[in-house]
Amino acid sequence: MPFVGRHRSLGVLRSAVDRTDASLLTVIGLRGVGKTTLVQRAFEDVPVLHHRLLPLPEPQQRAALARQLRDALSTSDELEEQLSGPTPSWDSVLDALVSSAPTEGPALVLVLDDAHRLKEARARVLAPIESALERARAENRRIHIVLVGRPGDVPAVGGISIQLGPLPFRATTALLPGSDPRERIRAYSVFGGLPAHLARLDPDQTLATNLRKTVLEPGAPLADAGIDLLERDFQTPSRYAAILATLAHGESDWSRMHEGVSDLTRSGQVAPYLKKLEELGLVEIRKSLDARPRTRSRRYTITDPFVAFWFRFVLPHRGVDGDTEALVAAVRRDLDDHVARIFPSVCRQFMANDVMESVGVNARELGSLWGAGYDIEVAGLLRSGAAFYGHALWADRPAGTRVLDELDRAVAETRYGFGRESRLRLVFSGRGFTGGLERATARRHNVLLVDAEQIVGS
């Protein structure tokens, strides 16, 4: 699979290891998001020790790392003694590492992958790491330690931290099935932006064929991918699954979330489950851009489209033998409704990363607006200072000026962007536009129409 969509994070890591001061870095993200691939690409030109921590008690974790250091480093008799024995201490292991680090030239990089296992083993490693780095700085030793693992479970540290989310739509287009822009948006709404899932696809096959072979048929490689995300991380995943099944039908507020978990008697009991899902990067909490600082008006949404697809369509049929055709029928019937719920986030990604192609600048503030009398899916400020407000329409092909009139009424209900010299109206459509709307837009300088082809960038 080609390396796509991570060039900014790649630059941050490479700049960090080019520094002479010893440092501690973290790379965190969902399982399958491409953390290991990123660090391997970032450090392919420097001396690197890539150590994957084992699901073992702490003494055995230390012993395994010591064995790798003995095999990989040029150690003196003194260092051999530090690393010998069945369970050398963290201080001994890290001191030996610092002693082997160069004082000039490329830095030595130690990658501790699956670093969440340090927390699982209750390893007291942060203090020894900080002590080792202080010694490295004092002796001008060039060394960087990188912790890689799941968010929420990697020990909290200072310094540079990179959190990887699902790839944005535009970065995945070459990997997705479908020959036209609309079909690729549909494919992204199904398969999402996790590289581990995208690597299973055959772009030369249709979306329907890829769906059957990778998700819908019994034994398909992604048939259990949704629940696997939970069962590997939680001993009792049922309530987390109920929350994700609720969110799979679209953004939800707090009350609807509570209704989705039937065995919780009070709405406040949902909070710790949501917090954990947010820490893992599975759920995002959104507030209206014009909300007051302490508002409780929030919306919750699943971050990756595939997770939403799996919990909406696959979970209800999981475990039912011979139910493949019923699952296929459900997907065929409701897929466009699912895509319509994903489409606004694809449009917001376009404003964040790609609208420069149309207006010369990207967004510097981005989100949505909602309140009494208005609900605007795409809103924010451009880097030029202009405010923008947009509706995202997947299934409808807007005709005439009705969509612009509705948008104008919604904009009039919010104070967001009031007083800005320029206030841009946006209409996103997955099915294109009629000539009547295009002619009306030509008479207004503050309206931009964006179709599927522009979103894809073809």
Image (spheres, rainbow, N blue to C red):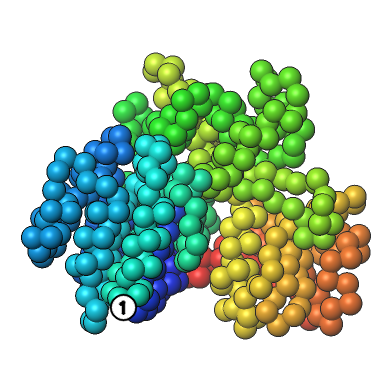
Q: Position of residue 89 (x, y in %)?
A: 27, 47
Q: Quadrant of residue 265?
A: top right
Q: Examine the rendered structure and indicate whether residue 89 appears above or below residue 47.
A: above
Q: Which residue is mark 1?
A: 140
**Label 1: few (<14), some or many (≥20) within 10 Å?**
some
Q: Position of residue 446 (x, y in %)?
A: 79, 77
Question: In terms of depth relative to the viewer, which is nearer, 9 or 55?
Answer: 55
Is 225 situated left or right of 406 in this image?
A: left
Q: Examine the rendered structure and indicate whether residue 99 appears above or below residue 286.
A: below
Is 361 situated left or right of 196 in this image?
A: right
Is 65 situated left or right of 75 in this image?
A: right
Q: Quadrant of residue 423?
A: bottom right
Quarter the N terminus occupies: bottom left
Residue under the image location 32 percent in, 70 percent down: 136
Question: In terms of depth relative to the viewer, which is nearer, 127 or 434?
Answer: 127
Q: Position of residue 333 (x, y in %)?
A: 57, 34
Question: In terms of depth relative to the viewer, which is nearer, 207 or 368?
Answer: 368
User: Do we see residue 228 in this rendering?
Assistant: no
Q: Amino acid at mark 1?
A: Asn
Q: Position of residue 450 (x, y in %)?
A: 64, 68
Numbered circles on residues, count: 1
Residue under the image location 39 percent in, 18 percent down: 322
User: Do we see residue 112 in this rendering?
Assistant: yes
Residue under the image location 70 percent in, 28 percent down: 269
Q: Which structural element holds mark 1?
A: loop
Residue under the image location 77 percent in, 73 percent down: 387
